[in-house]
C-alpha cells in the first residue's frame, strides 16, 4: 500500500517495525485480557532509545524533533500494538525541557533517557472540573521548603508504572487572579516518595487496557525544589505540551487507521463468498478506499503540525486539526474493518475488536472533539466564545 509520498524518518520506522515484530497480537491480547501493563515492550523501547528521542544529546537523548516521535508512535500502532503505555514520556518532558531549571534538567533528564527514571504520568483531570482545567481544586499550600498537596485527580494513566508525575495544581484560588489561568502551578512529583507521604493510587478498569487510575492527595509533601518554573504560571508551561500531546496522539490514530486498512484490504482479497473474493464487490472496496483517502489526508495534517512544532512555530490550530481529523478517520477505519471482516471482526484472535476499542478513546481523550471544534471556532475563525 503506497502513495508517491515517501514517509519521513524511514530508518526509525523500520527499526520500530522490527522491534514490534517481537510483540505480536498474542502479546497484546494476553495483556488486554488481564488489563496488564506491557512492561517488556516499554523496557525494549527504552533500551533502544526510542523514548528518549526528544531529550537533547547533552542529557543522553537523541535530540530529535517531534516529527521523529510521531514516526515511532505511528509505527507502533500500525503494527497492532499500542503506544499509550509510554507516549506520555514524550510530551510530559517538554515542560521540564523548556521550563525546568538547570539543576532539575541535570538531575532528571539523563536518568529518564537511560530508563532509570520513568516520567509517564501527567496529572491534570479532576472529577469536578472536567475539561475546564482552570477549575481544578487540587491545592498546594507552601510551608517553608515544601508544598503540602491536598485534592484528587481522575483518569491519571500509568501512575502505577511511573517514577515521576507532572502534576497541575492550584497555589492560589481561581478568583484571586486577573485571569482564570493564573494561580496554577506545575510540580514534578516523585511518586516513589509520594506514596509514603499521602498519595493513594486506585486503578480504574475501563473498556480498554490503559492502566488509568484515580489519585488522592492527603497532605502529600512535595519539595519546593520540584516546582517547574514560577509559582502560579504553570498553565502556560503545559500548553505547549498539550499541543505535542495532540500531535502524538494523532500520529497513533494514523497508525491505527493504517492497521485497519491493511487488515481489511488483505482480508477482502482472500475471503471468498459467492465464489469470489469479497473485495471484488464495490460495496466492500469503496469503504476501504474511502478510509484510505481519509487517513492519508489526516496524515498530511499530522505532518504539518509536527513540523511546525519541531520548528518552534505556533501550531495550535494545526495540532488540534490533526487530532480531530486523525481520531475521526481512525474510528471510521475501525468500523469499516469490523464490517469487512463480518463475524470475524468480533473474534479476539483477529485483534480488530481490541484495536476498535482502543482507537475509540481518542475522540474523548486527551481532549474531546467538541472542545477542539470550539477552539477552532473561537481562536481561528473569530466566532464568539461559546462557554
Ligand atoms: C482512558 C483515559 C485515560 C486518560 N488519561 C489521562 C491522563 O493521563 N491525565 C489526565 O490528566 N487526564 C486523562 N484523561 C482524561 C481526559 O483527558 C478527559 O476524559 C477528557 O479531556 C474529557 O474530559 P471529561 O472526561 O472530564 O469530560 P467533560 O469535560 O465532562 O465533557 C463531557 C462531554 O461534554 C462535552 N462538553 C463539555 N463542555 C462542552 C462545551 N462547552 N461545549 C460542547 N461540548 C462540551 C465534551 O466534549 C464531552 O464529550 C484520560 C481519560 C481516559 C478515558
Image (cartoon, rainbow, N blue to C red):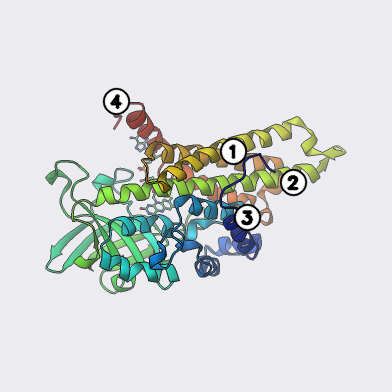
Task: Answer whether labels 2 and 4 touch (C-beta < 8 Å).
Answer: no
Query: Mark on residue 384?
Result: 4
Is any part of residue 328 visible from this angle? no
How far apart are the alpha carbons under marks 4 and 3?
43 Å
How far apart are the alpha carbons under marks 2 and 4?
47 Å
Query: Mark on residue 266?
Result: 2
Mark 3 / mark 2, whichever is N-terminal: 3
Image location of residue 351, percent across then percent down: 64, 54
Task: Answer whether labels 3 and 2 touch (C-beta < 8 Å).
Answer: no
Return the residue at label 1. 296
**Mark 1 Cα shell of 10 Å, populated few (<14), some (14-19), many (≥20):** some
Image location of residue 309, percent across then percent down: 41, 46
Give the quadrant of residue 376: top left
Q: Compared with residue 386, is residue 334 higher up or lower down, i.e. above or below?
A: below
Of marks 2 and 1, the one in the foreground: 1
Ligand 1 resides in the quarter of the picture at top left
Of marks 1 and 4, the one in the foreground: 1
Return the residue at label 3. 79
Image location of residue 369, percent across then percent down: 43, 37
**Mark 4 Cα shell of 10 Å, populated few (<14), some (14-19), many (≥20):** few
Task: Answer whether labels 4 and 3 touch (C-beta < 8 Å).
Answer: no
Q: Compared with residue 84, is residue 306 higher up or lower down, i.e. above or below?
A: above
Instruction: Check the picture and name the quadrant holding the C terminus.
Output: top left
Of marks 1 and 3, the one in the foreground: 1
Amino acid at each position: 500500500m503506497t502513495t508517491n509520498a515517501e514517509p519521513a524518518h524511514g530508518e526509525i520506522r523500520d527499526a520500530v517495525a522490527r522491534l514490534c515484530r517481537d510483540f505480536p497480537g498474542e502479546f497484546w491480547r494476553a495483556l488486554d485480557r488481564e488489563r496488564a501493563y506491557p512492561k517488556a515492550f516499554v523496557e525494549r523501547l527504552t533500551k533502544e532509545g526510542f523514548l528518549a528521542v526528544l531529550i537533547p544529546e547533552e542529557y543522553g537523548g537523541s535530540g530529535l524533533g517531534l516529527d521523529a516521535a510521531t514516526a515511532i508512535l505511528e509505527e507502533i500502532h500500525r503494527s497492532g500494538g499500542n503506544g499509550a503505555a509510554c507516549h506520555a514520556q514524550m510530551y510530559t518532558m517538554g515542560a521540564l525541557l523548556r521550563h525546568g531549571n538547570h539543576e532539575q534538567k541535570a538531575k532528571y533528564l539523563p536518568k529518564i533517557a537511560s530508563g532509570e527514571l520513568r516520567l509517564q504520568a501527567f496529572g491534570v483531570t479532576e472529577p469536578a472540573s472536567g475539561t475546564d482545567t482552570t477549575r481544578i481544586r487540587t491545592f498546594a499550600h507552601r510551608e517553608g521548603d515544601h508544598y503540602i498537596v491536598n485534592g484528587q485527580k481522575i483518569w491519571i494513566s500509568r501512575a502505577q508504572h511511573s517514577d515521576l508525575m507532572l502534576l497541575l495544581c492550584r497555589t492560589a484560588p481561581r478568583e484571586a487572579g486577573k485571569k482564570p489561568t493564573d494561580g496554577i502551578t506545575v510540580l514534578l512529583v516523585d511518586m516513589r516518595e509520594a506514596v509514603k507521604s499521602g498519595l493513594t493510587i486506585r486503578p480504574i478498569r475501563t473498556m480498554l487496557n490503559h492502566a488509568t487510575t484515580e489519585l488522592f492527595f492527603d497532605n502529600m509533601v512535595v519539595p519546593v525544589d520540584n516546582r517547574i518554573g514560577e509559582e502560579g504560571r504553570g498553565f502556560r508551561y503545559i500548553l505547549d505540551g498539550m499541543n505535542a500531546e495532540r500531535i502524538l496522539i494523532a500520529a497513533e490514530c494514523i497508525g491505527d487507521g493504517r492497521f485497519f486498512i491493511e487488515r481489511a484490504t488483505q482480508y477482502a482479497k482472500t475471503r471468498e463468498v459467492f465464489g469470489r473474493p469479497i473485495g471484488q464487490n464495490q460495496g466492500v472496496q469503496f469503504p476501504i478506499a474511502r478510509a484510505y483517502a481519509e487517513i492519508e489526508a489526516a496524515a498530511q495534517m499530522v505532518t504539518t503540525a509536527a513540523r511546525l512544532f519541531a520548528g518552534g512555530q505556533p501550531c495550535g490550530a494545526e495540532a488540534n486539526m490533526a487530532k480531530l481529523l486523525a481520531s475521526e478517520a481512525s474510528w471510521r477505519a475501525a468500523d469499516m474493518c469490523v464490517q469487512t471482516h463480518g463475524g470475524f471482526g468480533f473474534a479476539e484472535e483477529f485483534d480488530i475488536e481490541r484495536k476498535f476499542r482502543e482507537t475509540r478513546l481518542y475522540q474523548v481523550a486527551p481532549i474531546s472533539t467538541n472542545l477542539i471544534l470550539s477552539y477552532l471556532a473561537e481562536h481561528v475563525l473569530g466566532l464568539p466564545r461559546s462557554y
